[in-house]
Amino acid sequence: MTDNRPQSETAILGNPDQRDSDRVRSFLKSHGIADSHWYAPADRDDLDRAVRRQKVSRVVCISSSDLFEGVWNDEIVLHEWFERGVELEFVLDKGAAATCSEIYRSWRAFHERTRRRRAVAGAMLSVVAIVAAFVLIRIA
């Protein structure tokens, strides 16, 4: 299947049949966005792929939860969006675009800390399991 969409389009993240779709269409019209492609929340990985392939340079989210749910589920690699200069806008959450980068940086730092803790805890648990197995074998 060939993709005839323009190289630098605007993507809309959210469900087009949501009760807020009229507000989204009004937002698009007021910002002069005539050509856009809707991505349902279930298609966040497709949106992330389109951003990485530089087919999307602007993403309008109905709400910040639509975006962050994809980040938390590892469907969206948000730091790559920032590196590519993708413009983020939110229809329902005014001002969210300004704090989005800060929230994501904070979450990544937290995630790195907890990942290290889980790795250490896993290693310790493995050692305990090996020692327990050795003791059980010696007793039997």
Image (cartoon, helix red, strand yellow):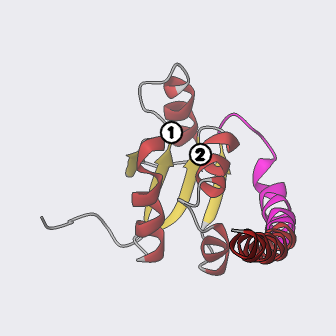
**Label 1: how many Cα within 10 Å (few below 14, some 14–19, many 20+):** many
Q: Position of residue 95 (x, y in %)?
A: 81, 46
Residue under label 1, please give it: 14
| Numbered range of the magenta stretch | 91-111
The three-letter code of the residue at mark 2 reads Cys
Q: Does the magenta portion include 67?
A: no
Q: Quadrant of residue 23?
A: top right
Q: Dot 2 corresponds to which residue? A: 61
In percent of width and height, residue 122 lies at 76, 71
Q: Amino acid at mark 1?
A: Gly
Task: Write the residue at 46% across / 33% down.
Answer: 15
- Do the residues under discs 2 and 1 have CB atoms within 8 angstroms? yes
Q: Residue furthest left?
A: 1
Look at the image and tell me in which quarter the N terminus lies: bottom left
SS type, badge 2: strand
The answer to which of 14 and 26 lies nearer the viewer is: 14
